[in-house]
Amino acid sequence: MQSKKVIRRFPSTLLLALAVGSPAAAYDYNHCVGDRIDWGRTTVDIYPHSGPFPFGSAKRSALEAAFAGWHNAPGTQFRYNVIYDNSPTLYFGDGKNSVFTTRDYDWGDAIAVTLWDPQCYWWGWGDLKETDVIFNDNVTWSFEVNPSSPPSPFSPYNFALVGIHELGHAFGLNHQLSTIATMNDIYPIGGTLGNYNSVQPHSDDVYGNRVGYGTCCTQRDVYASTYTSTSQTTTGRIPGPSQAYAGSSVSFQFSIGNRGTTNEGSVRVQYYLSTDRFISTSDTYLGAATFSMSSGGTSTFTATGVIPANQQSGTYYLGWVVDPLGSIPEVDESNNAVALVSPTLVTQYSSVCGNRVCESGESASSCLDDCPICGDSICGPVESSSSCPNDCPVVCGDSICSSGEDSFNCPGDCGTCGNFDCDPGEDYSCPEDCAICGNFVCEPGEDPFSCSSDCCVPGECQ
Ligand SMILES: [Zn+2]
């Protein structure tokens, strides 16, 4: 694929002033004056063409998965009545909701579009009259109902995932960019959910469906997602940290959401280390935390866990399980766990003996040079007479004018005082050699003849 494929919709008519401003932090519909533009009923006929969607084809299965994504969304009432059709002609404006694929469209950088015919009435109400969903036959599609790995932003594009997005438009939803959502306009939109890469509308999208068409009943569903908002307008997969150490803590981002009809006040999440991308509570436990999740909400948090000290070095996946104890009765229990998309190399921490830093894993017995013992009578490389005078006594003759030495008891290290040379080490200990003429102090070694400005005769000072 070219870098970023846009999934677009085109309103067909300018009869109404579209409220396409920037959507708030949630699902969005267009409105006529005050009325939301939707179908105004909970069942709508839609006609996929049996030409591009022949019976038994992978393409039809992928499209069916997109319909099922909405029909199985928790608490929803809206249903498409799907009728396959082989009409020889289909066109936008025939009053029939069609689904088909074609090369013959001004695609630009779009991979699918939903054509949309809304109507506003003079008394302020609005309705959808027709929506046609079309897919771009010039791009490469994959038709997996459960993709084998979380879809990337690149080709091939998952047909079911894009289908859910377009079918969201077909009942009236606008794009939603500011949260992780299936109605994001850049592929892979919100991505898939859970270990099985389930192609399901996200919490914000399902919430929008229920706002538009009502809630049938109480249904709960929390889920794990390996996607996050990668900018103000895009979503992408969360990478794993490239390295972690046995016995040390590890941090990583993770996303969870609540597609259910109720707020969840206490959602436990447990973090795991796994040898594969399938995460379960039998993997290596790293830690846990508890969150509250509003109905329709999705959030990305930072996990912190500790890798066991005896963990074998190797390549692992970090992951998480939402509601690991099964305390929330959910309509879908298969989307609760997921792994980060890229692996993490776990190794024993390797300290370096001799780098003069006493590191985790080093001790006096394994590396005395870096981790010295003050009092063992050995003056190690990181000890000195000031940090450990017991081990590192002052030595006259080491060319260091140490504390306790001066020009009298160790002239070799601290210079010879009185030789009229300001030797190294004498700056403070031998003012008579290091006197400064001109500082208005008549120092030892100065007299009115050698330094009249400092040692002037009273009354004659200049
Ligand atoms: Zn779209």
Image: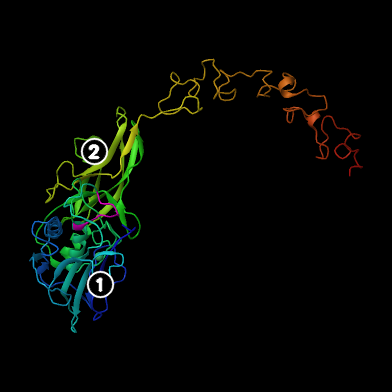
Depicted 252 relative to depicted 405: above or below: below
Whether 417 is among the magenta residues is no
Out of 15 and 54, give the one closest to the viewer: 54
Residue 77 spot, x, y in % from top left: 10, 63
Q: What is the C-alpha distance between the residues marked 1 and 2?
A: 42 Å
Residue 185 spot, x, y in % from top left: 28, 62
* Element type at mark 1: strand
Which residues make up the magenta segment?
150-159
- Image point 51% across, 20% down: which residue? 374
Mark 1 nearby-residue class (10 Å; few <14, some 14–19, many ≥20)? few
Q: Does residue 437 appear in the picture of this structure?
A: yes
Question: Residue 276: which disc?
Answer: 2
Kind of residue sitting beneath label 2: Asp
Callout 1–callout 2 Cβ contact below 8 Å: no
Q: Which residue is mark 1?
A: 10
Q: Quadrant of the C terminus?
A: top right
